[in-house]
Image: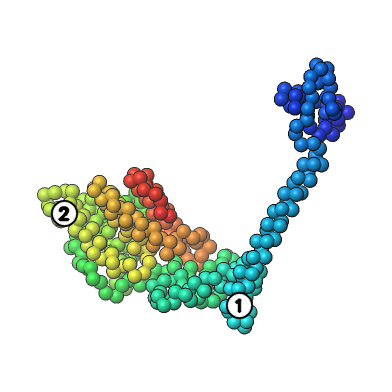
């Protein structure tokens, strides 16, 4: 039995007839035992020995190495031409350092766009042009200063073009309570209730007025109070007054990306779901939320950032709420995902 296995192990290949019939072949040349016993034609049309197969692989590998060598020579020349545009005094320039090359190409792009004066509106350019070292927290994870700045909520606008009025205190309290009890505050808990209520009591750290109107608009859907309606006789107009105020305020909050703005956008597109005519408006609001999520870096892993566990949980929850909303909108409206 072992001798037969050794013989089969040394067999290079079977003849065409044995291969077609799926029977064992002894590999004798010019005619194998099976073909000889039936006086049949025996032929070998497949590659010969294993040695020939190895040689074929070697030839193909050699051709691949030649192509790669030619490509790398061209790449080195291109990299050298980019480096020559910079002063020799830069100690960080290294032809064979892919990270430095990416940095050089990015700086070249930024320099060519300097006439657009984007420094005040784009934090990405500031992050590229500044050579701030990365900060490392106690847990050993690396976070850039730009990423850390994104984790901090920027101050609210100093002035507003939109309306700043709020409803009476009893209606305000009723809607906020409704939001956290019956509305999307429980179904999609994007806003931490204890933190939000604490901010309401702190006169120096009030919630965004855009977020307040968005929450009240959504809570009005679950309220029977006629004061939430533009027409007291039509329940379908509940929350429209707060929704209109939020839309008027939205432009005031487009100067900086804020987590509270993303939360407000979530409330607004949930409010629009009540009417099938709002499909385009829903899609637009979700698109704004998606892009602000990216600007805030909510898609980044913040598990080891130097922020509280509560902030980490809220960032993660808001991000996935927006992604899920986009997925559902695409499935319902037949659109393609933009993220």
Q: Position of residue 193 (x, y in %)?
A: 34, 58
Q: Which residue was labeled with disc 1?
A: 84
Q: Which residue is mark 2?
A: 229
Mark 1, secondary structure of its residue: loop
Residue 311 visible in this rendered orientation of the protein: no
Residue 308, given in percent of the width and then of the height, sits at 46, 64
Compared across the picture, whether 296 is left or right of 131 comes to left
User: At 24% across and 56% down in the image, what residue appears?
Assistant: 217
Residue 117 in the image: x percent, y percent? Answer: 40, 77
Asked if 120 appears above or below 309 in the picture, the reply is below
- Residue at image coords 83%, 28%: 27
Question: Which of the 4 image quadrants contains residue 99?
Answer: bottom right
Which mark, residue 133? none
Write the residue at 51% across / 65% down. Answer: 305
- Crowding at dot 2, Cα within 10 Å, few <14 / some 14-19 / many 20+, comes out as many
Q: Residue at x 25, y 72 (%)?
A: 160
Q: Around disc 1, counting alpha carbons within 10 Å, would you say few (fewer than 14), some (14 to 19), or many (20 or more)?
A: few
Q: Nearer the viewer, residue 13 or 256?
A: 13
């Amino acid at each position: 039995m072992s001798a037969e296995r050794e013989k089969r192990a040394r067999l290079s290949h079977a003849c065409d007839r044995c291969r077609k019939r799926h029977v064992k072949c002894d590999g004798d040349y010019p005619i194998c035992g099976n073909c000889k016993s039936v006086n049949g034609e025996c032929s070998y049309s497949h590659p010969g020995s294993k040695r020939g197969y190895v040689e074929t692989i070697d030839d193909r590998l050699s051709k691949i190495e030649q192509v790669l060598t030619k490509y790398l020579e061209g790449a080195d020349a291109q990299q050298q031409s980019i480096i020559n545009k910079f002063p020799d005094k830069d100690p960080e320039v290294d032809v064979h350092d892919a990270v430095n090359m990416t940095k050089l190409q990015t700086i070249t792009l930024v320099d060519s766009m300097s006439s657009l004066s984007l420094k005040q509106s784009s934090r990405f350019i500031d992050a590229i042009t500044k050579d701030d070292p990365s900060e490392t927290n106690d847990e050993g994870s690396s976070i850039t200063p730009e990423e850390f700045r994104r984790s901090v909520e920027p101050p609210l606008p100093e002035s507003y073009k939109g309306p700043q009025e709020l409803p009476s205190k009893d209606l305000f309290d009723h809607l906020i309570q409704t939001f956290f009890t019956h509305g999307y505050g429980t179904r999609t808990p994007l806003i931490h209730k204890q933190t939000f209520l604490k901010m309401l009591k702190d006169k120096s750290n009030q919630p965004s007025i855009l977020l307040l109107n968005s929450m009240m608009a959504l809570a009005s859907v679950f309220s029977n109070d006629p004061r939430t309606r533009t027409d007291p006789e039509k329940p379908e107009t509940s929350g429209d007054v707060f929704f209109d105020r939020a839309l008027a305020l939205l432009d005031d909050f487009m100067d900086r990306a804020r987590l509270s703005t993303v939360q407000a956008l979530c409330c607004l597109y949930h409010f629009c779901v009540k009417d099938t005519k709002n499909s385009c408006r829903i899609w637009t609001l979700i698109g704004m939320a998606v892009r602000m999520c990216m600007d805030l870096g909510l898609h980044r892993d913040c598990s080891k950032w130097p922020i509280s566990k509560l902030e980490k949980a809220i960032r993660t929850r808001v991000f996935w709420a927006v992604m899920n909303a986009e997925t559902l909108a695409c499935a319902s409206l037949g659109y393609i995902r933009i993220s």
